[in-house]
Amino acid sequence: MKKYVKILVVSLLCVALTAGSLTPAFAMTGIEEKINAFCENINAITVYDMTADKMLFGKNENKHISIASTTKLITCLVVLSVFQPDDVITVGQEIYLRKPNSSVCLIQPGHKLKVRTLIAALLLPSGNDAAYTVAVNTARKHSGQPDMSYERAVNYFCNLMNEEVKKLGCENTYFVNPEGWDNPNHYSTAADMTKIACAALNNAIIASIANIHYSRFYFYSGEWIDWYNTNKLLDPESEYYYPYAHGLKTGTTSEAGKCLVAFAEKDGRKLLICAYGCKEEEDRFGKIREIFEYVYSAPVMGDADESGVIDASDARIVLRASVGLEDVTVTLRTRGDVDKDGELTSSDARTILRVAVGLEQLKTAS
């Protein structure tokens, strides 16, 4: 008798699924369409799910763009490939290679700083003076030429930067300075910066320092200084504060606009956003925070085809899988097993169908 009841339930559900058009009482916006609505004033952006190793969204992601001080992520990676974090560097006249009116961390010739402190100088106040200090000293150490001129050393360091990004699989990136100053020959893409940012996050020194909002730093030579992070997502006093944000780097130039490489983690899910050419602070911080919040709250269970919309097609997919007409993949089981009993059944399909037509509300899953 139970067998016949199950057949009857499945048959009735098939009729419902194959009937004309279903007009839901409410409709959820697709993931890509929703994220795109946040990006009206953003030139290029990627939204990458690090946990699932999946690009969720891209806009102009392969377009050559100026990337401003987010360049310093690769600068940090190159420095840490040559120096140990507790090695000490003495600041010299190279700090005056910085451009007028550029951001500085206020280090001076004769100051002695550990490499980890200089990494903080690059990531928090975004010191271009620190960028030239690490570039020159890294080039001299790597080349074995301690007397290399400042200009030659900077060129040598940029070659190391370009070699490093090739190793990371970046095909549309080239650097001619260590700080990110606008130059037609200094460019990357949002897609390539996603690869660079992932590499930076895999470096414990960079990841931990980029997560600091404020700290007092002590130099090896005895001085101290207070540095604040330019990333307002990390500032508890900012209107843009986002408690799940953990870095990573800001950037601003006239050509690049307002830029942000932002990393967040919530309930074990890691998301990375690389946004370039934002018009206002609201776009750089407010809209990026909204994207994080949307993705973290977007429905997972029930959206079997990962379209961002729960509809009759999801129910149809689950039903076909439950009766053996479609392969049950790990992703399909995760998204379609609504009652989380470990199986895909007609009950799951029925629930999804009821949600699609507005007769039931499906709770989101993190």
Image: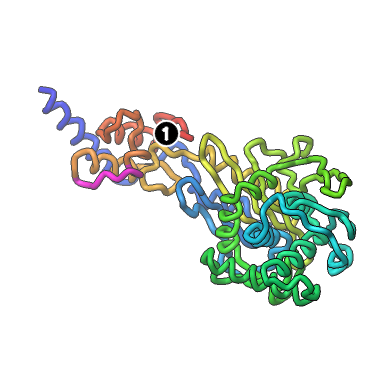
Most common SS among magenta residues: loop
| Placement of 351 over or under 275, stated as above or below | above
Is residue 328 part of the magenta span, yes or no? yes
Q: Nearer the viewer, residue 51 or 42?
A: 51
Is 296 on the left-hand or right-hand side of 64? left
Q: Position of residue 322 (x, y in %)?
A: 23, 38
Q: Quadrant of residue 162?
A: bottom right
> Which residue lies under the disc numbered 1?
358
Find the residue positioned furthest to the top.
Answer: 1
Q: For the magenta stretch, what is the residue range?
A: 325-332
Marker count (numbered): 1
Q: Quadrant of residue 244?
A: top right
For the point 87% across and 55% down, which residue is it?
111
Is 215 on the left-hand or right-hand side of 156? right
Residue 279 is at least partly visible in this image: yes
Question: Colour scheme used in the picture?
Answer: rainbow
For the point 84% across and 69% down, which residue is it?
97
The N terminus sits in image quarter: top left
Is 103 on the left-hand or right-hand side of 299? right
